[in-house]
Amino acid sequence: MSTNARHIRLRALTLEDAFVTWQWRNQDEIRNDFSGHPFPVNYEQEKKWYLKILGSNIPTTAFGIEIVSSSQLAGMTFLKNINQLHRQAEFAILVDKAQSGKGYGKEACMQTLQFAFSNLGLHRIFLKVRKDNTAAIKVYTACGFTEEGVLREDVYKQGEFKDVLIMSILSYEFQILDRGKL
């Protein structure tokens, strides 16, 4: 790992984080950016989700993104559908809108990739992102992800169908990235 100063660290989520993440999941911008669950979430649903996630690291591993200087939770990263046979997983990230634009997402993405390739021995990490989410695509590209294809009109958001990009990075591609990014 690089000796560059880190602004965030990945840590285990705790049930106490549920109150904060429940508020994020009910922000319109965050619900719009996620291709999945479009509905408001009540606190009981969030706690139930936490109990499921905290009970096992396979097939989903979730991390809290913590700001080093304040110990404040700034977001979460996920390795979903971890497939140990094919040595791949799907990456996802959620960053509190109040913390957007500070580089935390990119740093958390790189740290999660480091964990996936070094600790879990995975070979391929992929993600899905709406084609109109240019800010996220810019971060993913900076982290070494490349576009594999398009799922045409894959999600229905704000009254219209939207295309979704599939992007991925392979373990050897990650290894040759500038180590200063870590």
Image (tube, grey):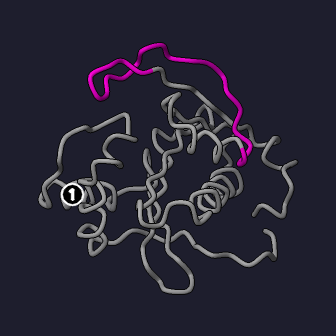
As for residue 79 lying within the magenta part, the answer is no
Tell me the SS state at disc 1: helix
Q: Which residue occupies 53% across, 28% down? A: 131
Q: Which residue occupies 69% across, 57% down? A: 114
* Residue type, label 1: Glu
Please tell me whether residue 178 is drawn above or below residue 69 in the rendered image.
Answer: above
Magenta span: predominant SS is strand
Q: Which residue occupies 31% across, 22% down? A: 156
The residue under label 1 is 46
Please tell me whether residue 50 is drawn above or below residue 15 in the rendered image.
Answer: above
Q: Position of residue 152 (x, y in %)?
A: 48, 13
Which of the 4 image quarters holds residue 50?
A: bottom left
As for residue 159 lying within the magenta part, the answer is yes
Report whether 108 appears left or right of 39. Answer: right
Residue sitting nearer the eye, 20 or 113:
20
Report whether 29 appears left or right of 10. Answer: left
Residue sitting nearer the eye, 45 or 120:
45
**Residue range highlighted in magenta:** 142-162
